[in-house]
Image (tube, helix red, strand yellow):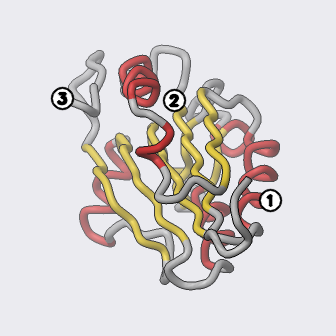
Amino acid sequence: MAREDTPRETVVLLAAAPSHKTRVLDLPAVLTAFTTITSAHWAKTTAGALLEWTEPVDPGILAQRLRSIAAGPGHLTVHLAGQLLLHRGRNTLYLALSRTTSSTLQSTALPLQSLASRLRRRPPGSSTVFVDLVAEAQVWQRVRYTGFTLGPGVRLYGALSPPPPRRKLIDPFT
């Protein structure tokens, strides 16, 4: 049991990508990498929780869980691996989940603005996000000119890759 003065930390590993032909991220490679790293390397403290979500299906449940976790005390570290898509009508970025297609984006993907809004409510410096994301062509064009952020006070690290050539998968660890 952790002492009361030991800082609490929550680590969330979230790996998601469409399960059909529009997948461009080599998700099995990501999951293999996640499993080869011990939990002690993910967190800075021994007090807290390590949560791993692979290929979530329901964006509503995922958003609700992220809301709940973000409302908790202590440091929050989120590792996002997946594909970023753009809802053209709303000009909003989404993390594609396993059932996401371009026509079902709004109901089957996680809007990044929902994650960002939860992280902005946390004390500055209490959230760190590591990304390993692949952008579709429209997202890539957008972030090249406007940048990519999850809001003030959120430390953001990692890589956002351009879309690969057609019918190729990106292995983020090569």
- Residue type, mark 1 in image: Ser
Q: In this view, does 126 lie above or below 59?
A: below
User: Residue at 31% of width from left, 54% of height from top?
Assistant: 158
Mark 2 lies on a secondary structure that is loop
Dot 1: element: helix
Measured from the top left, where is residue 149 in percent x and y?
Answer: 42, 70
Residue in front for this viewpoint, 7 or 77 = 7
Please name the residue that numbered disc 3 is placed on. 174
Q: Which of marks 3 and 2 is nearer the N terminus?
A: 2
- The residue nearer to you, when weighing 72 against 134, is 72
Residue under pointer 1:
68
Instruction: Give the residue at mark 2.
Output: 17
Q: Looking at the image, which residue is at 61% across and 61% down?
A: 9
Quadrant the C terminus occupies: top left
Question: Which tag, 1 or 3, sits closer to the chain's start?
Answer: 1
Vertical arrangement, residue 173 with respect to residue 109, above or below? above
Q: Is residue 167 left or right of residue 85?
A: left
Please tell me which residue is depicted at 72% across the width and 71% down the height of the picture: 73
Q: In which quarter of the image is residue 144?
A: bottom left
Q: Distance between the residues labelled 3 and 2?
A: 18 Å
Residue 125: x %, y % from top left: 49, 80
**Mark 1 closeness class: few <14, some 14–19, many ≥20 residues within 10 Å:** few
Mark 3: which secondary structure?
A: loop
Q: Could you tell me if the residues under marks 3 and 2 are in contact, i.e. CB atoms within 8 Å?
A: no
Q: Residues within 10 Å of mark 2 (few under 14, many from 20)?
A: many
Of the image marks 1 and 2, the number of the one nearer the N terminus: 2
Label 3 packing within 10 angstroms: few (<14), some (14-19), many (20+): few
Q: How far is disc 1 from disc 3 in space, using C-alphas?
A: 34 Å
